[in-house]
Image: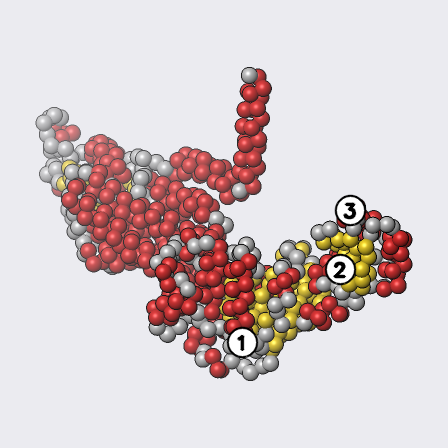
Amino acid sequence: MSEAADTLPQGSLPDVPYAIEVEGLSKSFGDRVVVRDLSMRVRKGQIYGFLGPNGSGKTTTIRMLCGLLTPDSGRGTCLGLDILTQAREIRRHVGYMTQRFSLYADLSVRENLEFVARVYGVPEPVKAAKAAVDRLGLSGRDKQLAGSLSGGWKQRLALGACILPSPQLLLLDEPTAGVDPKARREFWAQIHELAADGLTVLVSTHYMDEAERCHEIAYIAYGELLAQGTVDEVVAGAGLFTWSVSGGDPAPLARELSALPGIDMVAPFGSSVHVGGHDAAALEAAIAPFRERPGLIWRRDEPTLEDVFIDLMSRSKDNFR
Amino acid sequence: MSGAVAGLFRRVGAMMRKEMLQLVRDRVSFATMIMIPLLQLVLFGYAINTTPRHLPTAVLAYENTSLTRSILAAIENTKYFKVVSHPTSAAEADHQMLAGEVSFIVEIPAGFERAVRRGESPSMLVAADATDPVASGSAIASLNALVDTAVKRERFAVEGGPEGSGLESAPPAFQIITHARYNPAAVTQLNIVPGLLGTILTMTMLIFTALSVTREIERGTMETLLAMPIRPVEVMLGKIAPYVLVGAGQALLIVGAGRLLFNVPMIGSPGLLTLLTVLFIMANLSIGYTFSTLAQNQLQAVQMTFMYFLPNILLSGFMFPFAGMPVWAQWLAETMPLTHYLRMVRGIMLKGADGSDLAQDIVALGAIMLVAMFIAVRRFRQTLD
């Protein structure tokens, strides 16, 4: 809460290798545990994907990282600053983009950016806002009310507002939800550019293809961090063996297969079904009778990230129920 | 045909059921529906009295004789007057009236009893604060019958007086001269216009600020605001400052129009009025801001404002005489900024009161503002917990 926080120069942040380093974070609302004993580390300059189903605790974790929520237990640092005691300093250096568009709908694009620039104490806010408008490609629309922009442009404006005060860490909460594929691609290109300039980005999503664009990922379900590392590490770490079967009617086939011992994961994919298990021998034994069936084409394949996540999710559900 | 009617009932029924569920779920709306009638019933039933009795009266007696005691007893017996102070000088008495502490000053000159006994039919003065004609009217009317009562009670023969001579044309034992101060013609507008200044400011300032924080929460902008390096007190000051100007503009409009249309005077200092109006506006803004931090949505904020505004307007002395209310209601009213502001604005505009006359109300209003600001800042969540 010191006055110095307002004017803290960028260089004076503690020099630590990790932009985010938290241990044992827990948070419950009432008797509902939303995040349980979560530990994670994000190296500086990385794009860190935060994956998990709806209601898995992604938003709650992000809010704890930027001081919007106080953890019930646990400790950690953001940019080397304590998340429990230095929330205010953290806010100065972190750009947080909320899930829902949360700039002022009744202010124009430029007025929104100028407001952000002034609150963060950006020198020459009018100039900075104008530069941001140009950078965002919104030059012709700077007087348009933010509320009247299309979904893709709103998201672009929100990101522009986030990076305007030149933060060291970006926390993006499902930034691409409801955005068309072209805008999504452009968005990710911009994220990679920012990371190349040294910015650390934590981005939550439930799109698997976006996970593949991250340097590292973490998978969270039911409040627990189930896996983290590079995509390859996560897939390899899952210890999953998979087969793909096509040629039959996927839905009844999936029903039949999922009841069998040795099969831990069954997921229909279009006209084929992915079948997976942790014990390669048990899996093969389980599918052996089906391989005899005429018309079915069985193929051993590599587990995808999605296979791994669905497996992780079903396993953690078992632990909880 | 009957199928169409059945369909209509089914759809209206479905709609009704949905509305009822939403109504019951919205606790503040539900509470408003119960609280507002109850509040009105209690306030109108127990607190409000349009012909107030026991009005605070100062007695400035330059002699203490059995006759003066008898007169004072008779005055108190009318039930309209209640002697609350015995000032020792006219200046002290005037100050008490300017401050709104007393509504009447009874002045009995020296040598009064002797003059009565001599049959000189001397005069005593009853000065009334007529800024509120409703409050002072019936009390003044009751004074007419007072002379006889007081004299009968005393049962003394006046030497050469009317009772001795039995002449009907003889002058009464003494005369009561009433002096309706500040508003001799009992023009209601003189009282209403300054009062309106207070109520209009209360209403608009409360509504504007009560909505300000809830709007941010409802539109989802609060999350971004909280994630920015800005303190709760900075958010609050930034949010209420523009409304201080809006309120000042409103005040200017009302005072100006009051003067042009109703000839409402400005006897005291306009500068002091401006200063105290700003203080009053800030007190209301702080209270509105507190509601804003309590309400979950804009509708609740409006409902809370209304629940607060209702007792304000009924108890502050704007619509009904303050002195006519029971003590509990007066104490309740003392916690409301409007009560103090009404004394200030009527005092300054109609009576020419100055800062020292209004010191108590200024301190009270300042204290209310600080308490509300403190609560507002404490209530404003810096996190989403």
Percent of width and height locating residue B100: 27, 49
The residue that label 1 is drawn on is A196
Q: Nearer the viewer, mark 1 or mark 3?
A: 3
- Tell me the amino acid under the disc marked 2: Asp
Tell me, yes or no, if residue A298 can be seen here: yes
Let me know if marks 1 and 2 both belong to one chain: yes
Q: Residues within 10 Å of mark 3 (few under 14, many from 20)?
A: few
- Tell me the amino acid under the disc marked 1: Ala
Residue A311, numbered label: 2
Residue A233 relative to residue A174: left or right: right
Q: Secondary structure at mark 1?
A: helix
Q: Residue at x 55, y 20 (%)?
A: B5
Which chain hosts label 3? A
Is A48 situated above or below A243? Answer: below
Which chain hosts label 1? A
Tell me, yes or no, if residue A125 can be seen here: no
Separation (CA) of disc 1 from disc 2:
33 Å
Q: Name which quarter of the figure residue B238 lies in.
A: bottom left
Which chain hosts label 2? A
Q: Residue at x 73, y 51 (%)?
A: A271
Let me know if marks 3 and 2 both belong to one chain: yes
Mark closer to the chain start, 1 or 2: 1
